[in-house]
Amino acid sequence: MAEGRFISYLRVSTAKQGASGLGLEAQRAAVTEYLNGGRWTVINEVVEVESGKRNDRPKLAEALRLCRLHNATLVIAKLDRLSRDAAFLLNLQAGNVRFVAADMPEANEMVVGIMAVVAQAERKMISTRTKAALAAAKARGVKLGGDRGVVPPAGASARGGAVTKSRASARAWDVAPVIEEVQADGAVSLRQIAAGLNARGIPTARGGQWSAVQVKRVMEQP
């Protein structure tokens, strides 16, 4: 039985699907069915509309940031549908948040890590076969044009640097946009900013209430 705070992440592959809601309702229903019956709160639902050829996941990054802000769990509808998506798996693995998949509740960070390795291996094999086919075609005199190179997953290059960042700096990065919102609403002093964060339900890194001192420490982070 599900309990706690959740951020729902739904994904469709085309703008047409996103506009029509095709596929989103099924994912939303799967998430609702998984959570049904527990003491839970879905703080936000984040929808990603992207092409299968893209490696960046801006909405996934936003969902992970919200999870860290609210000390929430990321819930997705179908992990099996994304099990060959190296970019998604690498971002999820490096996100440093709890997650659960409605179709595979037993999946954990180790399972996702294995999936990411397999996905990368499959991608590398596909790239090798593609290059071999292009070389053979070129040898036969076929004129080739355009950029046919394979772009590595966006999360792969950034992953090493992200892991080395301190937790404090990462937390400050997540909280900074919310502090700016609080200041835009008229908060001037550190105490007022702390009150604004508490009013928005944003917990501290340890899950407590904000104080002026904690706000100062976060704002001083590089």
Image (tube, grey):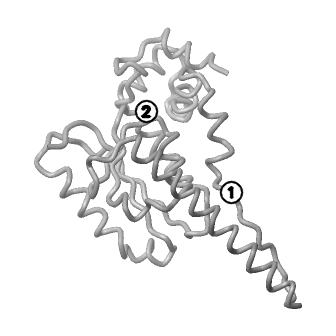
- Secondary element at tag 2: helix
Q: State which quadrant residue 152 falls in.
A: bottom right
Residue placed furthest toward the bottom = 141
Find out whether the residues at labels 1 and 2 contact each other: C-beta distance under 8 Å. no
Residue placed furthest toward the top = 213
Pointer 1 or 2: first along the chain:
2
Residue at image position (49%, 30%) is: 182
Q: Position of residue 4 (x, y in %)?
A: 24, 36
Answer above or below: position of 128 versus 17. above
Q: State which quadrant residue 70 falls in.
A: top left
Mark number, residue 27: none
10 Å crowding of disc 1: few (<14), some (14-19), many (20+)? some
Residue at image position (62%, 34%) is: 162
Answer above or below: position of 50 versus 144. above
- What amino acid type is highlighted by mark number 2? Leu
The residue singled out by tag 1 in the image is 152
Horizontal relation, residue 10 to residue 129: left or right: left
Mark 1 or mark 2, whichever is nearer to me: 1
Camera-side residue of 151 and 201: 151
- What amino acid type is highlighted by mark number 1? Pro
Camera-side residue of 126 and 6: 126
- Secondary element at tag 1: loop
Q: Position of residue 128 (x, y in %)?
A: 70, 68
The residue singled out by tag 2 in the image is 69
Image quarter of the N terminus: top left
Horizontal relation, residue 72 to residue 15: left or right: left
Answer above or below: position of 102 versus 189. below
10 Å crowding of disc 2: few (<14), some (14-19), many (20+)? many
